[in-house]
């Protein structure tokens, strides 16, 4: 685990080394007319200890096994990046994930909500840091600054299951760990105010990937705690269960009767999203399969990838094919430690909430303010997985394809 002695200057320097970011979306409604987003329209629960969940599809190259601990996401080499994502969307709502993050220097576990126009809400666990989790958010793929991240103390996240929850409404986002709120985002503290709050329909994406890989930018490797040591592999993350509650554009749970969400214009404002009623085959019950321990969710092909880049080209965009676009979209951001700096990065900061007295068993604070025990990954510093491999890449992905 990295030293907690990182100063504010170090944090700013790390952020200033971020070079751009490229995020992927199958169709960006801010730029053109896109297909409607199918709605959950209700509540869906997936118990991965019973097998695969038909609400999720696998990214290309993903192989997941299921056992009594849940869905097992395994990393044994740099190119591994098992990822699953929902085909349906929530338009405000709640997502609760019970997960034991993968251990290991250089290994990252992620749970992300992401929209077609690149609004994003994140949880990320760095395997070499067994005392905290990181949260982040993005609005419309904006990575002009990297000071949206926060760190929160949690006891032994790579050794035991914790419950990580997000409540998301038109008024803001609230992150909680084991039922205790650790962070609040509202118009009052969001960069850019209400307009910069995540506010468009989102998919849920879960995965693990290798940030500490050979050839990754130095900033990414540093954030991940160093290069992955495969002599200690396999590195397993266990997703025990997921509960998804769709509010269908309101501030309380929907009860079915919602088919899809349509962008009426290119503003990305939640008030412009049309909620279309009808039968969307609402998932209002538990949707798990107890089939076999190696059962796999349905694989899907994606729409044409549209890359939105800032300040740099990316090696991954050329490899982005129609059938694998979604395997390169979502979860995280990439960092480069070259001399080029991202605009606004000079003001980059990150916050952390650590257990009182340093005890890993102390309940996390709700403020999210203190000293991070690893280089902050807010925004574009997160993710850079092996080029050409299936990865989740969240708001701000640079030379990399990350989770999804």
Image (cartoon, rainbow, N blue to C red):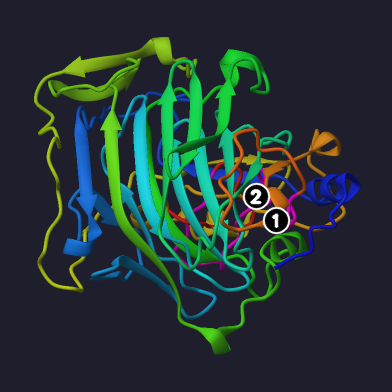
Q: CA distance from mark 1 to mark 2?
A: 5 Å
Instruction: Work out whether 100 lies above or below 137.
Output: below
* CB-based contact (under 8 Å), mark 1 and mark 2: yes
Label for residue 7?
none
The residue under label 2 is 355
Residue most extreme to the bottom: 231
Q: Residue at x 79, y 38 (%)?
A: 348
* SS under mark 1: helix
Residue 353: image location, x then y, percent: 66, 43
Can you give x and y, in whole percent of width and height, for residue 247 in the image? 29, 23
Front position in the image: 362 or 346? 362
Work out whether residue 51 can be spotted. Answer: no
Q: Which residue is mark 1?
A: 358
- List x then y, in percent, for residue 192: 67, 18
Highlighted range, magenta: 372-394
Q: Main secondary structure of the magenta part?
A: loop
Q: Does the magenta portion include 383?
A: yes
Residue lying farthest to the top in this orientation:
271
Towards the viewer: 308 or 356: 356
Q: Residue at x 17, y 62 (%)?
A: 50
What residue sits 44% from the left and 49% below the top? Answer: 111
Q: Is 67 on the left-hand or right-hand side of 393?
A: left
Dot 2: few (<14), some (14–19), or many (≥20) neighbours within 10 Å? many
The residue located at (21%, 59%) in the rendering is 297
Q: Is residue 91 above or below residue 10?
A: above
Quarter containing the N terminus:
bottom right
| Residue 248 seen anywhere in this rendered image of the structure | yes
Task: Tell which of 340 and 2 is nearer to you.
Answer: 2
């Amino acid at each position: 685990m990295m030293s907690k002695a990182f100063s504010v200057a170090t944090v700013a320097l790390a952020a200033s080394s971020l070079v751009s970011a490229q995020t992927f979306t199958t169709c960006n409604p801010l730029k053109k007319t896109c297909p409607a987003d199918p709605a959950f329209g209700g509540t869906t629960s997936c118990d991965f200890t019973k097998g695969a969940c038909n609400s999720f599809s696998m990214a290309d190259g993903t192989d997941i096994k299921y056992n009594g601990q849940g869905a097992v996401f395994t990393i044994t080499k740099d190119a591994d990046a098992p990822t699953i994502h929902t085909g349906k969307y929530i338009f405000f709502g709640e997502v609760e994930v019970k997960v034991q993050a993968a251990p290991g220097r250089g290994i990252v576990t992620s749970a992300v909500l992401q929209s077609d126009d690149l609004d994003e809400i994140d949880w990320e666990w760095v395997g070499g840091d067994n005392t905290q989790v990181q949260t982040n958010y993005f609005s419309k793929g904006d990575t002009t600054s990297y000071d949206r991240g926060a760190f929160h103390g949690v006891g032994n996240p790579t050794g035991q299951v914790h419950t990580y929850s997000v409540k998301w409404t038109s008024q803001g986002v609230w992150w909680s760990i084991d039922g205790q709120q650790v962070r609040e985002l509202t118009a009052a503290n969001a960069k850019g105010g209400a307009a910069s709050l995540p506010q468009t329909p989102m998919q849920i994406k879960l995965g693990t990937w290798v940030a500490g890989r050979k050839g990754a930018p130095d900033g990414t490797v540093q954030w991940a705690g160093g290069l992955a040591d495969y002599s200690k592999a396999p590195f397993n993350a266990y997703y025990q269960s997921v509960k998804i509650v769709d509010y269908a554009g309101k501030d309380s749970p929907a009860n079915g009767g919602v088919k899809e969400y349509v962008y009426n214009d290119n503003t990305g404002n939640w008030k412009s999203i049309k909620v279309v009623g009808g039968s969307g085959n609402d998932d209002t019950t538990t949707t798990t399969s107890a089939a076999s321990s190696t059962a796999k969710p349905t694989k899907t092909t994606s729409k044409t990838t549209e890359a939105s880049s800032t300040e740099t080209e990316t090696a991954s965009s050329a490899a982005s094919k129609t059938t694998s676009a979604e395997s390169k979209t979502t979860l995280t951001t990439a960092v480069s430690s070259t001399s080029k700096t991202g605009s606004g990065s000079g003001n980059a900061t990150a916050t952390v909430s650590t257990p009182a007295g340093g005890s890993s068993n102390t309940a996390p604070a709700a403020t999210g303010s203190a000293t991070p025990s690893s280089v902050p990954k807010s925004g574009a510093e997160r993710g850079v997985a092996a080029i050409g491999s299936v990865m989740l890449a969240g708001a701000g992905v640079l030379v990399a394809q990350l989770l999804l």
